[in-house]
Image (cartoon, helix red, strand yellow):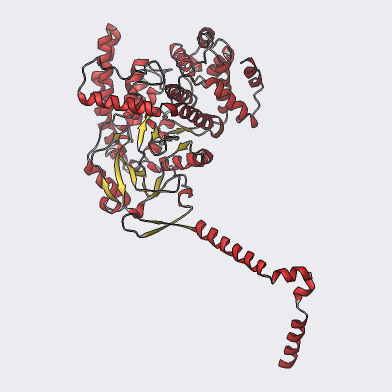
Amino acid sequence: FATRRLQTLRSSASNPLHRKLFPEKLRRFSTSIHARALASIFGVGVTFVGAYAAYRVEKNPENEQQVIVSMTEDSRAITRPPEVRHPYEEESLVWKTLFKIHRVLYFCILFAPCVFGGILCKLTEDPSLRAAWIRLLVTTIEMGGSSCMKFGQWISMRPDVIAGDIIQALATLRQNAPCHSFEHTRQQIERSLGKTVDEIFEEISEKPVASGTIAQVHRAKLKQKYALRGHDGRYIRDVAVKVQHPDVIRETFVDIDILFQGVNLLFAIPFSKEEFISAMQRQINFEWEAYNLWKFKKNFRQEITEGEIIFPAVSRELLAPQVLVEAWVNGHTISELFDGKNPNTTNAKGPDFSEKKTETDVMEERSKFSKLKQYKEKMGAWAKTLFRTNAKMFLKDNFVHGDMHAGNVMVSEEYPDSIVVIDAGCTCSLQAEVLPKFESFVSAMCEGDTDSVAETLIDLNEMKESTTKAKLSKFKREISKTVKKFVGSPGQDPEGNPVRIGALLTAVLKELQRHEMVLRSDFAMSLVTLGLTEGIIKQLDPTFDCVKSVMGFMLGEHAKDRQYSKLPNVLGQW
């Protein structure tokens, strides 16, 4: 057997397989020095790419220890959080009944002065008394707790239902909510994350930098092992720590039922209780905010890569329903910048110091105005980015940041060409059957098509039973007058300037209020968000033509999927 095997091997060696399969020239090249050099270069390249794709090695600047992090860490999907029941639902019927009685009595005592004050305002019609009553109302709502303040926020987004001076006062609830103690912050972090504050952070500010309806924010610095990955691949240790207020769970159990039953006695609430409860449940669970930020990053991958927009990085490891840790943004909100005067308008001389102010106030206003002048050349680009961002959210993704006021849009000192969008706890999406109506409504406003505007509003009116034919006829006439007041020709006002969408929307919503009509909430809040965004854009660039840009976006981007037969005619009339 061994002899026969040896003969077989010798036969194979004398006539190898590659002599049969490959020509003579290729065999010679394969054994040459050039082929070996090419093979070596190819092998080194493959090894380098594979190693770089698998791991990225950076040095810790403080202890020079190498930290190895997966290249795909920041791109991991955050799973959609489950819808959860309120923890108090597990309590006994007796306990829940007694708890509800307690909260009803508390609200009756708390709001009694507001009710009597409102009656006096109605009887006397005294402006000074009304101003005092509105201040009392805001204070009372703050004392009512998180559900009460969130209810006030939602009401402030509905100028079709509530008077303008009340809306302006309630808008302060967005950023000026009461703070809780640092001791609660410490306990909540340790209870939620299972680690002590000293284990997670090298330092954390005891004084919060901001306080909202649901939570407050502290600035902190992470330990190296908990460092986040930013959008540009850099490690981030400076973070914002969002911690839920102590009584949020207690104040979100039966308070919503009480508020809806009480307020419905005064006027029709312009949104459903189920919708409000769902939104509250998501906002008191910060896992939803983390999910929303991840989804925005996914939707805006290209814009993030091109440096137009930034959504803060979120720590997946340091995430709980009551605690959120995200990248700190060194910069200013748009509202902070425009507390001074806008150098892009006639107010270019700077702050007015005619009133008596402290030296600290004067220096602060001068500093803000200096920042404004520094950023002046970039404001036009920011306005365009903000427009494209909202147009994409509304008309392409149907996933919209539901609270994009000037306090939630920032400009970063490290990335001055980008805008930063924060606080994504509240989002809205239009139902499939409503989305085409929203797009047609926006198009009709831009064109000045009064009939289409009125028909859409009537179709989405939730008070159809109480709206008579006479009211509808009068409403159509008033809407026609209102639209013609703001739109002279497609895309332009009667004076030939760009249509002011925000002012037109406000006037239209006031007509709805005057005729006792209420829009379905998702449509109304989308319109209000659209108006808020236009206000920020106009602050940044007063010459920006939102109408022309909207129509251009719809024609150039969204018309790939849907046909807009009127759009070419509108653009042609321009």
- Quick one: which residue is furthest to the front in this view? 33
Quick one: quadrant of the N terminus? bottom right
Q: Position of residue 463 (x, y in %)?
A: 48, 18
264 to the left or right of 474? left
Tell me where residue 39 sits by quadrant. bottom right
Quick one: quadrant of the C terminus? top right
Is 449 drawn above or below residue 536 in the view shown? above
Tell me where residue 8 sits by quadrant. bottom right
Q: Nearer the viewer, residue 435 or 395?
A: 395
Q: Position of residue 96 (x, y in %)?
A: 30, 38
244 to the left or right of 474? left
116 to the left or right of 429? left
Can residue 104 be seen here? The reply is no
Is 382 drawn above or below residue 134 in the view shown? below
Q: Position of residue 150 (x, y in %)?
A: 35, 29
Q: Residue at x 28, y 24 (%)?
A: 365
Can residue 298 be seen here? The reply is yes
Q: Position of residue 128 (x, y in %)?
A: 25, 10
Is 235 drawn above or below residue 12 in the view shown? above
536 to the left or right of 572? left
Tell me where residue 84 sits by quadrant. top left
Query: How many marks can you see?
Result: 0
Q: Nearer the viewer, residue 423 or 464?
A: 423
